[in-house]
Amino acid sequence: MKRSIQSLAILCLFFVGLGAAAQAETLKKRYTFDYNSATRSASEAKAKKKARKQFLADFLETKFSKEIVTSLAEEIDIALDPPEDFLVNFEVKTTKYNDDETKIILTVEGEVDLPAMVSALVQNKVLSFGERPPKVMFIPSSRFDNPKAAKTMRALVYEKMKQAGLQSVAFEGVTEITSVQIKTSPNSIKILAKQALQYGADYLIYIDPETDNRPASVGGYICDANFIYTVLRPNDNRILGEGVISQRGSANSQMVAFDKTLDEAAPTLISQAVGQLYQSIFSDSDVIYDKKQLKNQIALSVFFKTSPEQTQAIIKALQAQGAYVTLGVGAGSDRLSLETTMDVLDLYNFFNDTTFTTDKGTKFKAPSVGYGENTLDVEIVAPTAAPRKPRPSSAPARRSNPGPSAGTKPKGIVCNLKGSLRAPGSVQ
């Protein structure tokens, strides 16, 4: 199936909403296919194969916009072939036929392995988290019976994230002992968020085991364990996903019994936790495109600020518009370096039309007082005051950027995390 890329970027929300459920979502569908009663077994097998493929396509339509599924249909189909690799517990519940046995009706039920699907889409250049992918930190509770088990778990989580092009943040440098329980400690979320923010993490996966490790009547030990995972956004202390995986293991020693329990639980635990992480990232993203937008590099000078909070308010407002902002200091002004899809005219109008508010509730304006080819000057004033510097007599001209040539068009979907949701250390 050939795709036809639309002119410029197609803006569309990637995830319909924040999925609070585990990543392996159960779907039930009914499909009707052509059927040949003369070749019953072969015809039924062919219908079941089509059902698996259609089931995966229907799942994608609940996650991607219709435009993306259509325009990148061929690339998605290639990346997710064979569909069996991404289906969990797929089952044909009922099989029926129409009266003249020319149609077969299959009712199917199954689950989709979202982490595996995302990894395949990334590796085949269909999906990208952008030039600055979110940073993710994994913290195991100090209640892990074996420190080596905690590191093994982290390595497995990191491998999943690496396959999807995310940035991992190591936890060895964390100085505080982490043994909090999310559901019993009112300050536990803040404790975890503080540790993650120290290292500039945009997201956090925390795993805490509850274990009952006891002697077995036939010798050795039995370990019953609940592995409780939490997906957290530390920038606003918000829990984005939770789950519990229960498992039993037995061995000659307590430590080995726990390790066996963890080994059995790890595949499901990682799949669900990382799946919820992906859902959170996509839900927190502004838009995606079927090609990259061209970015403009613009130097912004902010004159006559009276407090650092004013510059921070401007930075947050620009990040909310999708700009990547780097702060510097110049003589008589703050200098901001912007990487943005807006040109100078867009920014000129944005600053003239916007009233900014600091975290302390103070309102101010920042009208444009000068511009160049890739520069813009603004001056901070009270909402009803006029700037000291003279205003330009006319607005800057619109710059037209040529689109990329057909040979350089990227095929991948770009997913950009909202700047306002990034950890503070990620945007400085």
Image: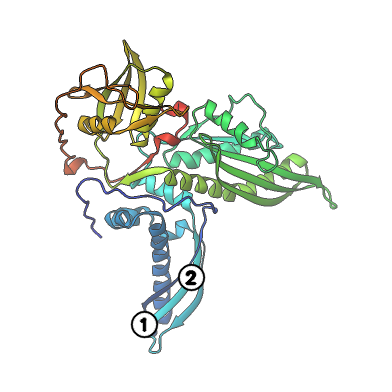
Residue at 39% over, 77% down: 43
Place of residue 44 in the rendered image (x, y in percent of width and height, measured from the top left): 42, 76
Q: Which residue is mark 1?
A: 36
Q: Which mark is residue 108?
A: 2
Apparent side of residue 164 relative to residue 218 in the rendered image (left or right)? left
Q: Earlier in the sequence, mark 1 or mark 2?
A: 1
Residue 125 seen in this snapshot: no
Frontmost of labels 1 and 2 is 2
Quarter of the rendering occupied by the C terminus: top left
Apparent side of residue 121 relative to residue 266 in the rendered image (left or right)? left
Q: In this orientation, which residue lies closer to the viewer: 33 or 275?
A: 275
Spatial CA distance of label 1 from label 2 is: 20 Å
Quarter of the rendering occupied by the N terminus: bottom left
The secondary structure type at the circle numbered 2 is: strand
Most distant residue in the right direction: 217
The secondary structure type at the circle numbered 1 is: loop
Q: Amino acid at mark 1?
A: Asn
Q: Is residue 364 depicted above or below 2 in this figure?
A: above
Q: Is residue 391 depicted above or below 237 in this figure?
A: above
Place of residue 266 in the rendered image (x, y in percent of width and height, measured from the top left): 60, 46
Residue at 45% over, 29% down: 361
Place of residue 229 in the rendered image (x, y in percent of width and height, measured from the top left): 61, 44
Q: Which mark is residue 80?
A: none
Place of residue 386 in the rendered image (x, y in percent of width and height, measured from the top left): 27, 22
Most distant residue in the bottom direction: 100
Q: Are marks 1 and 2 in contact (CB under 8 Å)?
A: no
Residue 305 seen in this snapshot: yes
Q: Quadrant of residue 305?
A: top left
Q: Residues within 10 Å of mark 1 (few under 14, many from 20)?
A: some
Q: Amino acid at mark 2?
A: Val
